Amino acid sequence: MSSEKKGWFKRLKAGLSRSKSAVSGGVTGIFTKRKLNAETLEELEDLLIVSDLGVAVAGRVTKALSKDRFDKEISDIEVREVLASEISAILTPVAKPLMINTENRPHVILMTGVNGAGKTTTIGKMAKGYIDGGKRVMLAAGDTFRAAAVEQLQIWGDRVGAPVITKPIGSDAAALAYEALERAITENIDILIIDTAGRLHNREELMAELGKIVRVISKKLEGAPHDTLLVLDATTGQNALHQVDIFGKVAAISGLIMTKLDGSARGGVLVACAEKFKLPVHAIGVGENIEDLQPFNAEEFAAALVGDTEA
Amino acid sequence: MFDSLSDKLGGIFDGLKRRGALKEADVIAALREVRVALLEADVALPVVKSFIDKVRTKAVGASVLKSVTPGQQVVKIVNDELVAMLGSDSVGISVDGLPPVVVMVVGLQGSGKTTTTAKIAKRISEKDKKKVLMASLDVRRPAAQEQLKILGEQIDVKTLPIIAGQTPVNIAERALQAARLQGFDVVMLDTAGRLHVDTALMAEVQAVRGATNPQETLLVADSLTGQDAVNVAREFDAQVSITGVVLTRMDGDGRGGAALSMRHVTGKPIKLVGTGEKMDALEDFHPERVASRILGMGDVVSLVEKAGETIEKEDAERMAKKMAKGQFDLNDLRDQLRQMKKMGGMKSVLGMLPGMGKMKQAAAGAQMNDSVFRRQEAIINSMTPKERLKPAMINASRKKRIAAGSGVGVPEVNKLLKMHMQMAKMMRKMSKMGKSGRMPQPGQMPPGFENLIPRG
Ligand SMILES: Nc1nc2c(ncn2[C@@H]2O[C@H](COP(=O)(O)OP(=O)(O)OP(=O)(O)O)[C@@H](O)[C@H]2O)c(=O)[nH]1
Ligand SMILES: Nc1nc2c(ncn2[C@@H]2O[C@H](COP(=O)(O)OP(=O)(O)OP(=O)(O)O)[C@@H](O)[C@H]2O)c(=O)[nH]1
Ligand SMILES: [Mg+2]
Ligand SMILES: [Mg+2]
């Protein structure tokens, strides 16, 4: 994965096929020629739990599956199809690409998330996509806290050919965001993407700082930030629900991106998030490289969670 | 978002009378809730299963102590088993031996390796008085080596000069050589983040391992990790044979089930925990604290520690000692009020105390406002130092003076004194409970705390 060059879609499939193997293997193990009874249902529920769907959602999905089918013979392929369609039904309404409104001068995107989730890397990948699409992109190094965070974004800026607005470490992040927005306006930039320092949602003072960044931006430009994205790490378990909840309250999160789906974590908590918060999911990260960002596709994600039906 | 296990079990056993021994049916009902609680705390399913099996065997037939309910008895058994499984003793990092001793950190992307490398380096150079050299073998992530270099400057620990274009093995060998020539005791190797399913990168770290023969190979993992924790830990252990785990982001509100998962599948100790981004936010691992966190039981120790973030450390220690002895005067109450303001209100504090589930909901419902804390603080400020130490001496005329001094009525002074009395009583109770190891009543709030919720 690190060395071979593959197409985006192939990468996604390669990544997700690793993630799905445990569940789909499990489904086959349980269901080839078996009855859908209490015992098999419990095993099925377990398999969803292992994907981080959470106990409650796994229970509901399994229940939906058993409706009309209880005590009937069911093949593993059928099980997977029904499971995938149940999950897909939850995810489809939230699968929405991020829309850039060119009337926004500039369209401001604020990236937020807990530490190490993949904010800075995702900014690099997004910037690449927009620049390839002919947009003028500017980046703002709003992580004025972590060692070498500015340098990290600077390198991404160089890679994709986007100017990066910086201030020395320790500067006020809101002031940096303000200045960057001012420059983006005068330089007639199309899209300004603002990085922020990673912060845990239960750290009130850090969340207050994030709230301030949002306020300062919206004061400078009405309607901005136009998108405030929360980056979730697919390896995170049920805590992601807290993250969406609190970041949503403090920074009015408008959409989610889930990273690190190229690992063996399946990111099932996204299903619980979709059910509970109904926030759009824009994209997924499937690697560390610049091209490893994919639009979020509900059906593929659901199929990967339960195992590919056509495989 | 999650009800604590003790609240839930309280519900199950509410209808049941006390009995002499735990019946199988009760145990099974209780363990169903335990299972859900563990899964909600992100303990991996296979680990949950084997844990439940163990507890079931222990719990069925166990006698219920006179003073507790069956639910509490089960919680106690569950808690003890959890602590035992998490590893009873805190194991440090071993850096003694023929220098240079190599410590290598490994882990998934973004788990906190670089930060943890610097934190450990700071700790062993300050506490163990070792001469430490750090080297970043991360040749992939933008500015990764720069990051470690900056951290080294912050903590005053040397880093290996960066030479572009070298492979991780080259860098590691150069670090060892530099350490030998310049008399370093310990070499800390920070590695690039990698997925355990990425065979090429796992081979890379194996090569580093082969070239440097680390005395410690630490898996740095995020305490917010979900079900995948078992795969990550098992694979890293199988492929590079780790000597221990460091769990980061324990300052978050994750329930930390990954700790149990990783410990269970590798049998390797959790050696340290990261509790913040700053360089001194590294602590020893305490199984009891993590156990109560997984169970949603809270504990007084982390309450005191959280307070330590905002007040001076000595204050926290003084408070911990006093609380352990069951002492609590008006100075302590004032400290608490101040901290509550600083910590952003009571909700966060309440969650850390045992049996506070219901209380937390009540607090969330009531409008928490700082003005109440401020008024209460003003009352205490109007007292003399002696009065603060010995509230019993506050008679009617003193009360009048205090009320006038703080601009409130005498009833409000009375209310504060009553609240203090109840809290002091609770502290005494808690310190006794701590000694006998008994659990608090599920869902019951320590007396006195309800008065802290401003009403109306
Ligand atoms: N495998 C994989 N790694 C990723 C992905 N996205 C980001 N990463 C890696 O995760 C690590 C952390 O990414 P960053 O972009 O620095 O994360 P961040 O949220 O900006 O981190 P802080 O600013 O420190 O809070 C880096 O090593 C990235 O290369 C992904 O989709 N897959
Ligand atoms: N809140 C909190 N943040 C932490 C802790 N440990 C590390 N971090 C933060 O997590 C983020 C990632 O930390 P790094 O040390 O860069 O992680 P890494 O594993 O070296 O990342 P890669 O090299 O990209 O794989 C940074 O924002 C750190 O400040 C911790 O214990 N608590
Ligand atoms: Mg960043
Ligand atoms: Mg690193």
Image (tube, rainbow, N blue to C red):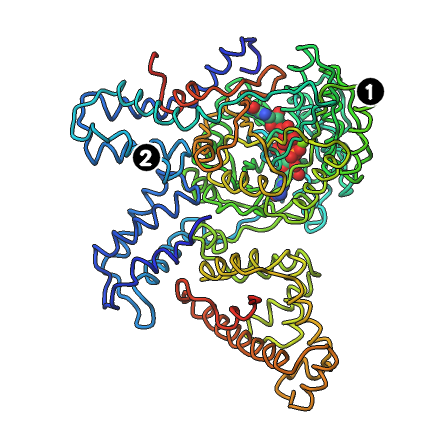
Q: Position of residue A38 (x, y in %)?
A: 20, 36
Tell me which chain the residue with mark 2 is part of: A
Residue type, mark 1 in image: Glu
Q: Is the C-beta of the residue carrying label 2 under 8 Å from the nearest atom of ligand 1? A: no
What secondary structure is found at the residue carrying circle 2? helix
Residue type, mark 2 in image: Asp
In this view, the mark in front (2 or 1): 1
Whether A206 is drawn above or below A233: the answer is below
Tell me which chain the residue with mark 1 is part of: A
Whether A272 is drawn above or below A19: the answer is below
Q: Quadrant of residue A193?
A: top right
Q: Position of residue A191 (x, y in %)?
A: 71, 21
Q: Is residue A199 left or right of residue A311?
A: right
Q: Quadrant of residue B206?
A: top right
Residue pictured at 62% horizontal, 43% vertical: A250
Residue in front for this viewpoint, A127 or B68:
A127
Residue pictured at 60% horizontal, 45% vertical: B274
Residue identifier under label 2: A46
Residue pictured at 68% horizontal, 31% vertical: A225
Residue identifier under label 1: A187
- Mark 2 surroundings: few (<14), some (14-19) or many (≥20) residues within 10 A: many
What secondary structure is found at the residue carrying circle 1? loop
Q: Position of residue B334 (x, y in %)?
A: 66, 71
- In the picture, which quadrant includes the C terminus of chain A? top left
Q: Position of residue A96 (x, y in %)?
A: 52, 22
